[in-house]
Image (cartoon, rainbow, N blue to C red):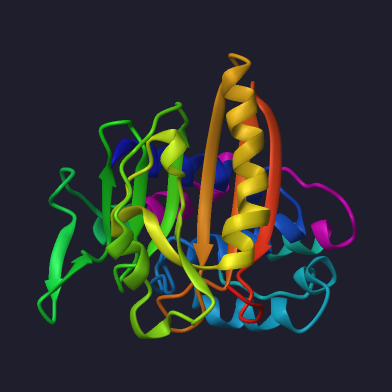
Amino acid sequence: MAKYMGLAVQKAFERDVIHGDAKSRTEFFTYGLASIGISLLGDKGLSKLGTAAKVAKTGNLAEKAGKLKVNTGFAPELEAAGRGTTYKIPFNALHHYKENILKIVEEQFSTVKYGGHYTKVNRKKALKSNVQYTTSQGYKYITDELGRIIDVEAKLELGNAKRNTYAQRIVGGDDRLANDDGGHLIASIFDGSGEIDNLVAMNARINRSEYKIIEGRWKKALLEGKSVKVNIKPLYKGESLRPVEFKISYTIDDKLYSDRLTNYTGGKK
């Protein structure tokens, strides 16, 4: 497991579970873990996430979290958080749960050298499943069990990467819509790869407007000599290769910002 992946999970666990509230804990055990491809943890660790996800979707997340039953051994803390308090749980009480999660992450994802993240599916170039790869610019990517990009982490730099118009036309495969572009997760103006390892099927309106506006903020900050770090999480439904949403968080000189963009299905290209 790459060091950054384990550290990211550990920091999220300590922030959202140990020092969190009902909402943050529920999101960690449902959407947080699911976003990196972990959908089931063993009986010796955490219970199935499906129950938590079902509860979270039925109503207000914070309200439902107080009633959520997750076999982690800290139900009283969840109940306290459900009453509107932030309850700090002793680190030792949850240490073995954190270690179990980190072990699963380590077993599930493997780090490959850049270039070794490709495979062939039906004689077509594709991304390997459950791998982590890093570009020469230091941009880090993670794929899930279907070879879909689920996480991108980068400290941006200005550049002018070459585009691959063919890759942009075909990315998303059969799940791509007529009004989709091949959207760069990290734009070419930041030296983002023009290959399928940095592309997803993205609604043209998102790619050319909403996503581009955010990229403009990053470019402006870099031109002003500021530091820009980004984390991009494409979210998917079922086994589709086309994201339904993009969860974007970034810092400009350590000031945190976040956006969520819906990958629309309608509109004109």
Residue 46 in view: no
Farthest residue to the right: give it.
Answer: 83
Q: Give coordinates of residue 74: x percent, y percent.
A: 65, 60
Report the number of numbered marks.
0
Residue 221 placement: quadrant: top right
Question: In this rendering, is residue 22 above or below 121?
Answer: above
The quarter of the image holding the C terminus is bottom right
In the displayed structure image, the side of residue 154 where residue 25 appears, left or right: right
Along the line of sight, which residue is nearer the eye, 130 or 260? 260
Q: Give coordinates of residue 148: x percent, y percent.
A: 36, 67
Farthest residue to the top: give it.
Answer: 225
Q: Is residue 246 magenta?
A: no
Along the line of sight, which residue is nearer the eye, 220 or 253? 220
**Residue sitting at 33 percent across and 79 percent down?**
173
Q: Give coordinates of residue 184: x percent, y percent.
A: 44, 53
Q: Residues in magenta? A: 80-102
In the displayed structure image, the side of residue 161 where residue 82 appears, left or right: right
Residue 163 in view: yes
Majority secondary structure of the magenta segment? helix
Residue 266 placement: quadrant: bottom right
Question: In this rendering, is residue 265 above or below 190?
Answer: below
Q: Give coordinates of residue 1: x percent, y percent.
A: 26, 46
**Residue sitting at 32 percent across and 59 percent down?**
165
**Residue sitting at 36 percent across and 85 percent down?**
174
